[in-house]
Amino acid sequence: MWTGWWFCLLWEYIYRTIFIYFLVLIVIRAMGKREIGQLSPFDFVVAIIIAELAVIPLEKSDLPIWHSILPLVLLGALEVIISYATLFSHTLRGLICGHPQIIIKNGVLLRKEMRKARYNLDELLAQLREKGIVDPADVEFAVLEISGKLSVIEKSQHRPVTPADLGIPTPYEGLPTVLVMDGTTMIKNLNDIDLDENWL
């Protein structure tokens, strides 16, 4: 009797785990490909709620699994709808995602913008050092992106010299293409560059 009860409980946990795993996978895939650093505040909140909802049916086996399925699906659908809406509405995009902020302009720190973003000097200097810049005066523009990353445009006299600066022509390089992976010929990649297996 005990063995049968234990087996049923184990089987229920197994199928719930597998089902929730694939459901969360589908919802996350529907939300789109984004890195953690690229999540807007709305995306971040949705991700946390999805994680919490996914745990409920695993912790409470007596609770019907659809109690979590419905909120998960609704949250995923809401995220997709909002994401599409922000593509067409600049105002909505600003409300949900925020706006980039200029932190340095022509080598001068914009303290007011830094206070608005609650972004301190230590954080700024650390991100500049990560980009190989020691002196903020060498920066033409520094923009704090909505992801929290710092985009930096150095002053022209401090940028590395390029072939274009020297007037040296360079050939088109194109995108590197994998033709063989793990011993398997990538037919689609060959077709994309107008080649076939005979060429290999």
Image (cartoon, grey):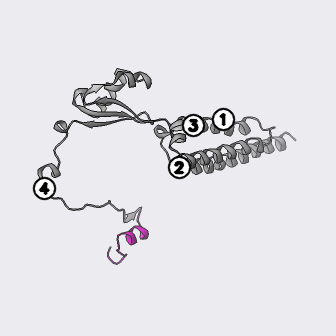
Quarter of image, res 186: bottom left
Callouts 4 and 3 close, C-beta under 8 Å: no
Comes first in the chain, label 4 or label 1: 1
* Residue at the spot of label 4: 168
Up-down: is 180 above or below 15?
below
Span of residues in magenta:
182-200
Decide whether residue 188 is among the magenta residues: yes
Q: Which mark is residue 88?
A: 2
Quarter of the image for the C terminus: give it.
Answer: bottom left
Q: CA distance from mark 4 to mark 2?
A: 42 Å
Up-down: is 182 above or below 73?
below
Which numbered disc, 3 or 2, marks the residue closer to the eye? 2
Callouts 3 and 2 close, C-beta under 8 Å: no
Comes first in the chain, label 1 or label 2: 1
Comes first in the chain, label 3 or label 2: 3
Q: Disc 3 on helix, strand or loop? A: helix
Name the amino acid, label 3: Phe
The 10 Å Cα crowd at callout 4, few under 14, some 14 to 19, many 20 or more, is few
The 10 Å Cα crowd at callout 2, few under 14, some 14 to 19, many 20 or more, is few
Count of marks placed on residues:
4
Name the amino acid, label 2: Phe
Residue at (32%, 33%) from the top-left corner?
A: 142
* Residue at the spot of label 3: 42
- In the image, taking residue 171 as reference, residue 53 lies left or right, namely right
Q: CA distance from mark 4 to mark 3?
A: 47 Å
Q: Position of residue 195 (x, y in %)?
A: 34, 74
Comes first in the chain, label 4 or label 2: 2
Which numbered disc, 4 or 2, marks the residue closer to the eye? 2
Callouts 1 and 3 close, C-beta under 8 Å: no
* Residue at the spot of label 1: 52
Q: CA distance from mark 4 to mark 1?
A: 57 Å
